[in-house]
Image: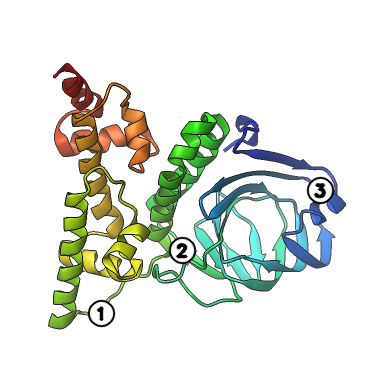
Amino acid sequence: MPFAALKQSAHLKVQCVSSLDEFKAIGFVEFERLTLLGPFFYERVITALPGAHLMLEKSYPRNLSATMNAMGCTVVVPMRGQIDSVFNGQTWSSFDLGLLRNQITFDLREPRPNTFAVIRFASDMQNRGWEETEGRLHLRRAGAADLSWLQHVIQQIFVLSSSMPHREFVLAAEALRQGLIDALDRVLAFRSDRRPGSRSFERHRYLVSRLDEFARSRPEMPLYSEALAREIGTSVRTLQLAVQEIHGASLHQHLRIRRLWCLRAQLANGSPMTSVSSAGMANGFLHMGELSRLYKATFGESPSETLLRSKGA
């Protein structure tokens, strides 16, 4: 994503740092040793969602020893095709996501500029099935399709924070956050290879029935995995395993179908102020082209056709 395409707004801060002293003053890391391997330059854009800060960073060539506070949980996502970096002796490829918790001391060799998205959650993001060990870097290899989707979701958040009117972005912020977490789950959540016993199956079937009943009883309510897990009285990770066992689908896929049905109900009962984009955003769909494709494949018509029919009635 070209930095030049992102303009400063009420929800997006653009920084171009011209000196090393200015970079050190930002304060995310405590420097021990730093050697420049090429010209210094640093660009960054920052936006915020509920409980999270997102940064898009273009780094400079360097050898660096430092300590970083990863807050509750920090995820680093490569955003361009060729990554050239060694972090604490681990080669960081263009398909690796980095996961850090709490404080970490590191040695970094970065002989070329790289572009990363850095997602800093205030929460430790435990009980989602992500790696939970603190104080070290965990690299998780992503499949090409999952990484491409995650990069697309991140890009859309930055574009919308740059271009969307203030009120609309505030209303969409929770849906954007949930879409981001769902995309991260596709890469970071561990899958269980254990064969469940009968007691486990009954427990999972009960949880999924509660999930589905809650979704049916609140057709107007956007479905977010964390809120649903709290409502049902379990963890997101347990809910992920239950849906996988009962429906043979990921929690992300299951909730996406539910969101499509919630969206359809809102469009079918549309008020004069309802639009496809506003209803789509409220249900966690960030990309209108992708929404139209999914909606038509599921219901045999476009979202706009459903909305027009409701207004015509």
User: Residue 194's mark?
Assistant: 1
Inspect the image, locate mark 1, and give the three-letter code of the amino acid beneath it.
Arg
- Please identify the quadrant where the N terminus is shown: top right
Estimate the x, y position of residue 186 in percent, counting from the top left.
37, 58
Report the Cα–Cα distance between label 1 and label 3. Answer: 50 Å
Nearer to us in this view, 84 or 72: 72
Whether 307 is drawn above or below 50: the answer is above
Estimate the x, y position of residue 105 in percent, counting from the top left.
70, 73
What residue is pinned by disc 2? 141
Report the Cα–Cα distance between label 2 and label 3. Answer: 30 Å
Whether 30 is drawn above or below 55: the answer is below
Question: Element under label 3?
Answer: loop
Q: Looking at the rendering, which quadrant does residue 269 occupy?
A: top left
Residue lying at 61% horizontally and 76% vertically, measured from the top left: 135
Q: Is residue 51 left or right of residue 44?
A: left
What residue is pinned by disc 3? 40
Q: Is residue 167 left or right of residue 14?
A: left
How many residues crowd around disc 1 within 10 Å: few (fewer than 14), some, or many (20 or more)? few
Inspect the image, locate mark 3, and give the three-letter code of the amino acid beneath it.
Phe
- Please identify the quadrant where the C terminus is shown: top left
Question: Element under label 2?
Answer: strand
